[in-house]
Image: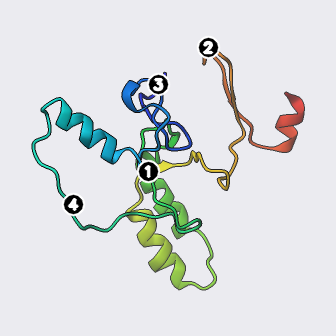
Amino acid sequence: ESVPCPVDDDGRFTPEVRDFKSLHVKEADKAILAELKTRGRLIKSGAVKHSYPFCWRSDTPLIYKAVPSWFVKVEAIKDKLVNNNDKTYWVPDFVKEKRFHNWLVGARDWAISRNRFWGTPLPIWRSEDWEEVVCVGSIDELEQL
């Protein structure tokens, strides 16, 4: 099932946004304001100075959009993770009792999917109808498929 999002991977409105299709979302502000004014639906227009998130790699503005994601249900196994950490030998040892322990205690469900070209590829295959989903755990397992 897809997540509704009328913005494509290049940050442009898709055909669902008829009046602004193919316009980059950052370049569409003035046209959207003009359309709202024309329709008599503009209540107030102005500028608000605020910080805006930029990609630390490319220094380009980020666009938040709904995308499907895969999560590891970490909160359900948090106690087991903390217990196993107690059995692990760490060098330096303070990582075990402080940094990593604190991270595990506060761990939340973890989004492992990425939609960026520098992300880690996940060895997950699925059938067209989603009846079969396979996560390959090793090269040996992949060779057996």
Of badges 1 and 4, nearer the viewer stands 4
Marks 4 and 2 close (CB-CB < 8 Å): no
Residue 29 in the figure: left or right of residue 80:
left
State the residue lying farthest toward the left.
43
Question: Badge 1 local density, few (<14 within 10 Å), some, or many (20+)?
Answer: some
How far apart marks 4 and 2 lie (CA) works out to 47 Å
Indicate the secondary structure of the residue bearing disc 4.
Answer: loop
Residue holding disc 4:
47
In the image, what residue type sits under mark 2? Asp
Query: Sequence order check: which comes first, mark 1 or mark 4?
Result: 4
State the scheme by which the image is colored.
Answer: rainbow
Residue holding disc 2:
129
Question: Badge 3 local density, few (<14 within 10 Å), some, or many (20+)?
Answer: few
Residue holding disc 1:
63
Which residue lies at the image location 58% right of the left edge and 65% below the top edge? 58
Q: Quadrant of residue 5?
A: top left
Q: Nearer the viewer, residue 128 or 138?
A: 128
How far apart marks 4 and 3 lie (CA) works out to 28 Å
Of badges 3 and 1, nearer the viewer stands 3
In the image, what residue type sits under mark 4? Ala
Q: Position of residue 15 (x, y in %)?
A: 47, 24
In the image, what residue type sits under mark 3? Pro
Residue 34 in the figure: left or right of residue 126:
left
Tag of residue 15: 3
Which residue lies at the image location 59% right of the left edge and 67% below the top edge? 57
